[in-house]
Image (spheres, rainbow, N blue to C red):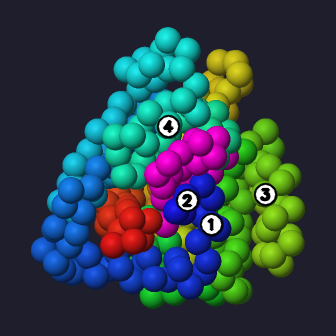
């Protein structure tokens, strides 16, 4: 039995296999429509979610399986004080695989330690979000036919952005990638992520201006400033509009640059950008379903 808590729980070769399976599902969905007949996915979502929860549920239903679960902590016995460890023990009696979203870093690892079924981390606080990373890798590969030799810009909340942390770790598995980190000083990438990148020999530069660096980027990964990760409202209000991508800023970008965003967005990408062919974030959403289908199949040995 395997769990996916961190994107590097899969090797580079296994990520390649996952992407290949997801691409085959995209091309031949009917061939996979009964693969999980009789299997049950449990979604343990202690934190709000649209894309991640619904894509997991859609993935399992499209594989012919069934779904149970809860969409917020107050809809489960967590509201009565039940621990994650006890909840996942109970879930293990009812389902074959589970996905957990939790506001606390490390909650998915705790669940895996007590679970009798495979656990997938669907986001734990500001730590990691591996299935979003696999979605991002599938999107990048589908657009660029490569996961190496790219210049990838990350803009916005890099301190609390679990999608950023996960994707950086994964892209460091591939050679010759360069990273440009654009953020206010209060939201810079955490030191432990920088240390991991340095250990893998990854090149990264920090910048305060998106306009000065956007022309170098093959991929621009935008993120929102997350109100739920701040300890006080004053800091959030001060920083929430730090970087907004609009058509004026986009004028300096490469014609084939791809704009990605894990969503939801607030105002960090102006609606006018949606019509630009470089805007790929809704296409990215669609890939999320297929990569989660592939991951469910892998963890269930199907």
> In the rendered image of this protein, does residue 69 appear above or below residue 33?
above
Task: Judge the density around disc 2: few (<14), some (14-19), many (≥20) Cα neighbours within 10 Å.
Answer: many
The region drawn magenta spans 110-134
Q: Give the numbered dot on residue 9.
A: 1
Check disc 1 and report its element: helix, strand or loop.
helix
The alpha-carbon separation of the residues under discs 4 and 2 comes to 15 Å
Q: Residue at x 55, y 15 (%)?
A: 81
Inspect the magenta stretch and tell me whether residue 119 lies in it: yes
Residue situated in front as seen by the camera: 61 or 227 = 61
Q: Are marks 1 and 2 in contact (CB under 8 Å)?
A: yes
Q: Which residue is mark 2?
A: 4
Q: Quadrant of residue 172?
A: bottom right
Q: Position of residue 23 (x, y in %)?
A: 32, 79
Task: Judge the density around disc 3: few (<14), some (14-19), many (≥20) Cα neighbours within 10 Å.
Answer: some
| Badge 1 or badge 2: first in the primary sequence | 2
Check disc 3 and report its element: helix, strand or loop.
helix
| Badge 1 or badge 3: first in the primary sequence | 1
Q: Position of residue 250 (x, y in %)?
A: 50, 63
Badge nearest the viewer, 3 or 4:
4
| Badge 3 or badge 2: first in the primary sequence | 2
Q: Which residue is mark 4?
A: 88
Q: Residue at x 24, y 63 (%)?
A: 36
Q: Which residue is mark 3?
A: 193
Q: Residue at x 16, y 68 (%)?
A: 33
Residue situated in front as seen by the camera: 118 or 248 = 118
Task: State left or right for residue 48 relative to residue 293.
Answer: right
Q: Position of residue 137 (x, y in %)?
A: 50, 72
Badge nearest the viewer, 3 or 2:
2
| Badge 1 or badge 4: first in the primary sequence | 1
Residue situated in front as seen by the camera: 120 or 240 = 120
> In the rendered image of this protein, does residue 296 appear above or below residue 13?
above
């Amino acid at each position: 039995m395997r769990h996916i808590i961190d994107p590097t729980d899969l090797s580079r070769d296994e990520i390649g296999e996952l992407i290949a399976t997801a691409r085959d599902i995209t091309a031949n969905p009917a061939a996979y429509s009964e693969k999980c007949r009789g299997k049950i996915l449990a979604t343990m979502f202690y934190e709000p979610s649209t894309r991640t929860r619904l894509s997991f549920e859609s993935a399992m239903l499209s594989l012919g399986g069934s779904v149970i679960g809860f969409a917020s902590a107050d809809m489960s016995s967590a509201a009565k004080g039940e621990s994650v460890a006890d909840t996942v023990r109970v879930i293990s009696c009812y389902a074959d695989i589970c996905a957990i979203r939790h506001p606390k870093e490390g909650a998915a690892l705790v669940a895996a330690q007590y679970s009798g079924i495979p656990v997938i981390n669907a986001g734990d606080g500001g730590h990691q979000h591996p299935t979003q990373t696999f979605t991002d890798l599938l999107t990048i590969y589908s657009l660029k036919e490569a996961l190496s030799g790219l210049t990838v810009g990350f803009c916005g909340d890099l301190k609390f952005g679990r999608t950023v942390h996960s994707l950086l770790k994964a892209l460091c598995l591939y050679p010759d990638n360069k990273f440009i980190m654009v953020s206010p000083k209060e939201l810079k990438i955490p030191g432990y992520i920088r240390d991991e990148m340095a250990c893998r020999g990854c090149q990264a530069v920090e910048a305060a201006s998106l306009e000065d660096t956007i022309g170098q980027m093959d991929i621009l990964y935008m993120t929102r400033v997350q109100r739920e990760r701040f300890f006080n409202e004053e800091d959030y209000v001060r920083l929430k509009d730090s970087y907004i991508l609009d058509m004026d800023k986009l004028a300096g970008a490469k014609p084939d640059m791809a704009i990605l965003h894990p969503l939801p967005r607030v105002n960090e990408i102006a609606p006018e950008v949606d019509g630009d062919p470089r805007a790929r974030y809704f296409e990215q959403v669609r890939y999320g379903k297929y990569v989660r289908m592939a991951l469910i199949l892998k963890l269930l040995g199907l």
